[in-house]
Amino acid sequence: MERVLIVEDDEKTAQIVRSYLVYEGYAVEIVTDGLSALRAVHREPPDLVLLDVMLPQLDGMNVCRELRRAGDVAIIMVTALTTEADKLAGLGAGADDYVEKPFSPRELVARVKSVLRRSARNAAVDLGSVTIDRNARQVRVHGTRLALTPTEYRVFDALARSPGTVLTRADLVHRAIGFEYEGMDRTIDVHVRNLRKKIEAAGGRPQVIRTAFGSGYALDADA
């Protein structure tokens, strides 16, 4: 069952949208402010976020930017801001689609289905001996599923989204642990060490995660 997170501070609007999505078979969660949205996505990433722009605590544009920095969850902005500049700002922040208020709930559901279909095309990633199934949140090496913790999976997935690109420890903390984490960046070293051990135990090459000394880590596509 695909999951949709509704970020909307108008309870009536949120409940109407929820009822249509539930009828179509989606699991739905509602939060009413931007900070709660970031926490909800980090706690259990949804397949799609319906994101209002005018929100308490943290507005939708900033929420969208934070979500996009952390990964590629599908995002549809739903807002009363309807100028061309508003739409361009929303898409520039990383939204996949932009729906104006007032809207038809049926049209919104159709947009949800369309964006999720596009997202599904990127759900499976083949990196040679390593494959990632993002729907199942699994990593396999030569067909063997790795028993990863949620954080280990997110670290590997973050690296796999930008193969060959060095991500700093701070980048990986933000993407894998969360924007509110206040611990040491070196925690990432522990997760990478565990990933390498599990990759090697499954017959893979631990060097697939390359250390960029003084900087961070990169997924070495050549390995």
Image: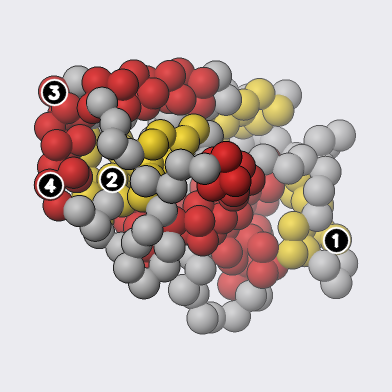
Question: In terms of secondary structure, where does tag 4 sit?
Answer: helix
Real-space CA distance between mark 3 and mark 4, rounded to the nearest whole angstrom: 17 Å
In the foreground, 187 or 68 = 68
Question: In terms of secondary structure, where does tag 3 sit?
Answer: helix
Q: Nearer the viewer, mark 1 or mark 3?
A: 3
Mark 3, residues whose alpha carbon is within 10 Å: few (<14), some, or many (≥20)?
few
Q: Name the residue under label 2.
A: 6
Say which label, 1 or 4, has the lower sequence index: 4
Q: Mark 1 points at which residue?
A: 212
Q: Residue 180 at what x, y percent from top left? A: 46, 73
Real-space CA distance between mark 1 and mark 3, rounded to the nearest whole angstrom: 49 Å
Mark 1, residues whose alpha carbon is within 10 Å: few (<14), some, or many (≥20)?
few
Q: Mark 3 points at which residue?
A: 23
Q: Which of marks 4 and 2 is in front?
A: 4
Say which label, 4 or 2, has the lower sequence index: 2
Q: Residue 34 at what x, y percent from top left? A: 37, 62
Say which label, 1 or 3, has the lower sequence index: 3
Q: In this view, does 193 lie above or below 81?
A: below
Q: What residue type is labelled 4?
A: Lys
Q: Quadrant of residue 60?
A: bottom left
In the foreground, 133 or 170 = 170
Question: In terms of secondary structure, where does tag 1 sit?
Answer: strand
Say which label, 2 or 1, has the lower sequence index: 2
Residue name at image x 51 percent, y 81 percent? 182
